[in-house]
Structure formats: C-alpha cells, structure tokens
Image (cartoon, grey):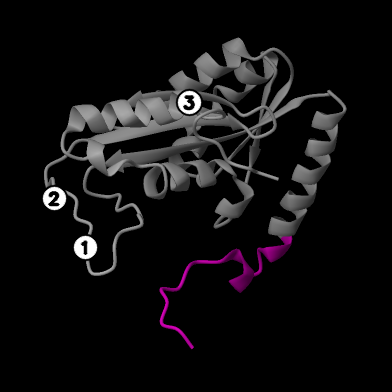
Amino acid sequence: MSYKRAKKSIMKNSKWKKYFDKYAQLQMIKGWVKKGVCELCFYDESGFSLNSNIPYRWSPIGEALKIPANRFSKRINVLGFLNTQTKDLFHTMTTDKVDTQVVIDVFDSFAKQIKKTTICVLDNASIHTSKKFKTKIDEWEKLGLHLLYLPPYSPELNPIEMLWREMKYTWMDLNVLDSFESFHQHIQDMLNSFGSKYDINFG
C-alpha cells in the first residue's frame, strides 16, 4: 500500500459511458484527419508563477536543490491550441485575468487563420460554456472551426495537458526562477520552440 492523494475520476459515477463515447468519437475524428478531411486541435489554458511550479531535477545525493521563494510573483496565463499530429501550437500569453472575453478573443484569432475545417476539443470550464461564449459558436463554425466538449473530469482526453505538465515540471530551468523577466522569457521560449527543442511523443 502507498499513501496517495485521491483524484476525481469519471469512473466513479454514472457518466463513465460518456467518457468512452467521447473517446470513440475522438478516434473516429483522428481517422478523418489521416484522410485529410479535417484538422484536430486541443485547447486549454494554464497558469504559471514563480511560486507554483517545483520542477524535478537530478542532484548529488545529500545535496538539496533549492529555488527562490517569490511570494508575490505575478501569474502568467497561457492559452493554447495544440495540433498533436503536426506539433503546431497556436498560443498567446497574458498576465491579465483570463475571463470569457479573453478566451473569445483568442478563439477569434485562431479561427481566422485556420486553413481547413478544424475540430477543437475543450473542457467544460465556465468560461467555455458561458452564454457570451456560446453566442460566438455559429460565427466560428462559418469559418470552419467546430467545438467538441469533453465530459467532466477527463483531462487525459486532452493532450495539451501533457504540454503544460512538461513545461512546469520537466523543461522548467531552475536558473530562470530568480526573476520574473527571465521566467517569462523562458516560458515564451518553450512555447515558441515546441516541436523542435522541446517536444513530446503523443503516440
């Protein structure tokens, strides 16, 4: 036995069928992608701060790794659309609060630059399901962007979660944690270099 923190799971309730139905639907869409019918991307937001991310690193036995404690660090919010097949990452960064209007703005920008019909997978966060957000769906669909909502508590169906995890706990450079400016630049570098210097095998 091991002592672990419990995680919310869709398997614990009656919505498990929706989970597997959505999984099957995603597999079908991936088949369409291989045939060139459409593109598939995954959308999410994530926050970064000098206080919240404690990366893992190798260190000599008996020698502790320490990072500065920056109690009043600003938060960097990243909004991203990830195509796991092409490794294309459309993203924006802000230190402002992310509300429905901010999300609408980034969806507007993304929808205007897509080249073919694109299905975008996203979760059911309130900023994605608000009345204001949903009034834009018809407009995006006319541009070729269609939304596919995930069931509750199913982050494993959204691979962009893997990107956030790698950025926070694997790729984060301890040397940039001394200042907000270097921290901000490193996050920008990780995003801009995804698919080359920083990569993930989504296979």
- The spot of residue 189 in percent (x, y) is 39, 26
Which residue lies under the disc numbered 3? 193
Number of callouts? 3
Residue furthest front as drawn = 60
Residue furthest bottom as drawn = 1
- Residue 169 falls left or right of residue 65: right
User: Nearest the camera: 3 or 44?
Assistant: 3
Q: SS at mark 3?
A: loop
Residue 50: image quadrant is top left
The residue depicted at 14 percent of the width and 48 percent of the height is: 68
The residue depicted at 51 percent of the width and 14 percent of the height is: 109
Label 2 and label 3: CA atoms lie apart by 27 Å
Which residue lies under the disc numbered 2? 69
Q: Are marks 2 and 3 in contact (CB under 8 Å)?
A: no
Is residue 35 magenta-colored?
no
- Residue 172 falls left or right of residue 196: left
Q: Which portion, as a residue range, is magenta?
A: 1-17
Residue type beneath disc 2: Ala
Q: In which quadrant will I find the C terminus? A: top right
Q: Are marks 3 and 1 in contact (CB under 8 Å)?
A: no
- The spot of residue 72 in percent (x, y) is 11, 42
Q: Nearer the viewer, mark 1 or mark 2?
A: 1
Which residue lies under the disc numbered 1? 64
Residue type beneath disc 1: Ala
Q: SS at mark 1?
A: loop
The local crowd at label 2, few if under 14, some if 14 to 19, many if 20 or more residues have their Cα within 10 Å, is few
- Residue 153 falls left or right of residue 59: right
Label 3 and label 1: CA atoms lie apart by 30 Å
- The spot of residue 101 in percent (x, y) is 39, 24
